[in-house]
Image: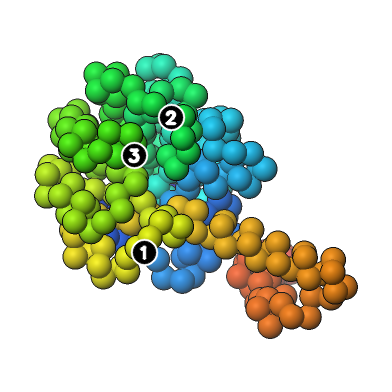
């Protein structure tokens, strides 16, 4: 991705946040997912550390490196012009490491990254046994990221809701905004009322993470009514893929056939077209024809 294209993606994401319409950004872990998200008409794509770790057969406990995440992000940015919002966990080390992470993500073409306030080793936000760094240490992390970035947006994430409740969330959001972040992210908000409180109190746009396993599950219009900037469906696709693959494999093992799932499969010709085979063939023909 050229610097010009990257700057355009970052600028586009700023516009989406400014709309305060809870713009949906589905998540994926690979370029194929990014192609499908773009094909469906979405305006942004998210890359979560959980989904990348899961695709490697690992839990989301800080086992995936910043280098691996940057490579995954680069693959998504190469596959689609949509702005990529990438998980950067705790920055993968100290202050200097955070700055290097930001530069690596920016080279990868990432439009925004989110940096969280957990202690190392970090945990998935839905897991127990996590703890937070002090407000001062989180400010240092964010300052390092903001100093290193050029065009990319920096989103501050706090996992305070599940540990300390709404008052601490509001305090940390204000602190992150004072540090200069472009937006804040607060996982574990489970009611529209709480979301509205955070949105009204935050000087910068708020990014929401949707978890289908948490009830109630709100519609896009309900989320938009709160004034959220973005709604990330970070692990929706990988959860669905794992469940469907389990069902297919179980049926094949027990019944010796995949017939019950054939109608749900994309025809091979359509998949080949989605992957760009016709575009590559046209390029080859043009080059070969120019030599005659």
Query: At x 45% / y 52%, what residue is drawn?
Result: 234
Q: Which mark is residue 284?
A: none
Q: Which residue is mark 3?
A: 162
Q: How dense is the environment of label 1, judged by Cα within 10 Å: few (below 14), some, or many (20 and up)? A: some
- State the separation of the CA atoms marked 3 and 2: 10 Å
Question: Which residue is farthest bottom?
Answer: 263
Taking 151 as reference, is 261 above or below it? below
Vertical side of 204 occupied by 43: above or below: below
Classify 10 Å Cα crowding around label 2: few (below 14), some (14-19), many (20 and above). some
Secondary element type, mark 3: helix
Front position in the image: 115 or 134: 134
Say which residue appears at 48% left-offset and 64% top-offset: 37
Q: Assess whether mark 2 and mark 1 are in contact (beta carbons under 8 angstroms).
A: no
Q: Does residue 286 show up?
A: no
Rendering coords of residue 115 (x, y %)? 36, 33
Quadrant for residue 22, please give it: bottom left
Label 3: how many Cα within 10 Å (few below 14, some 14–19, many 20+):
some
Q: Residue at x 78, y 80 (%)?
A: 259
Q: Residue 39: image x %, image y %?
A: 49, 70
Q: Is residue 85 left or right of residue 262?
A: left
Residue 279 left/right relative to 221: right
Of labels 3 and 1, earlier in sequence is: 3
Give whichever of discs 3 and 2 has the lower sequence position: 2
Q: Which residue is mark 2?
A: 130
Circle 2: element type: loop
Q: Is residue 56 visible?
A: yes
Quadrant into which the C terminus falls: bottom right
Residue beneath the point at 88% across and 73% down: 256
Q: In the image, residue 155 lies at what x, y percent?
A: 30, 39
Q: Which residue is mark 1?
A: 217
């Amino acid at each position: 991705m050229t610097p010009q294209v990257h700057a355009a993606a970052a600028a586009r994401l700023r516009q989406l946040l400014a709309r305060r319409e809870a713009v949906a950004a589905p998540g994926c872990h690979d370029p194929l997912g990014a192609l499908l998200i773009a094909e469906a008409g979405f305006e942004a794509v998210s890359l979560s550390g959980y989904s990348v770790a899961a695709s490697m057969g690992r839990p989301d406990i800080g086992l995936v490196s910043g280098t691996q995440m940057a490579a995954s992000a680069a693959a998504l940015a190469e596959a689609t012009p949509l702005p990529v919002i990438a998980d950067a966990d705790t920055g993968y080390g100290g202050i200097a490491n955070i700055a290097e992470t930001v530069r690596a993500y920016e080279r990868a073409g990432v439009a925004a990254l989110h940096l969280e306030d957990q202690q190392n080793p970090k945990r998935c936000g839905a897991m127990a046994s996590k703890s937070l760094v002090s407000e001062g240490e989180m400010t240092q992390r964010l300052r390092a990221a903001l100093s290193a970035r050029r065009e990319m947006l920096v989103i501050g994430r706090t996992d305070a809701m599940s540990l300390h409740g709404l008052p601490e969330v509001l305090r940390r959001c204000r602190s992150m905004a004072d540090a200069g972040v472009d937006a804040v992210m607060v996982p574990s908000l489970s009611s529209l009322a709480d979301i509205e409180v955070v949105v009204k109190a935050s000087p910068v746009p708020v990014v929401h993470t949707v978890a289908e396993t948490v009830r109630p599950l709100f519609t896009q219009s309900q989320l938009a009514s709160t004034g959220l900037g973005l709604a990330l469906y970070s692990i929706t696709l990988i959860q669905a893929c794992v469940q469907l693959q389990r069902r297919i494999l179980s049926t094949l093992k027990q019944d010796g056939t995949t017939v019950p799932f054939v109608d749900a499969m994309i025809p091979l010709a359509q998949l080949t077209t989605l992957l760009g085979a016709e575009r590559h063939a046209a390029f080859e023909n043009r080059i070969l024809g120019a030599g005659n």
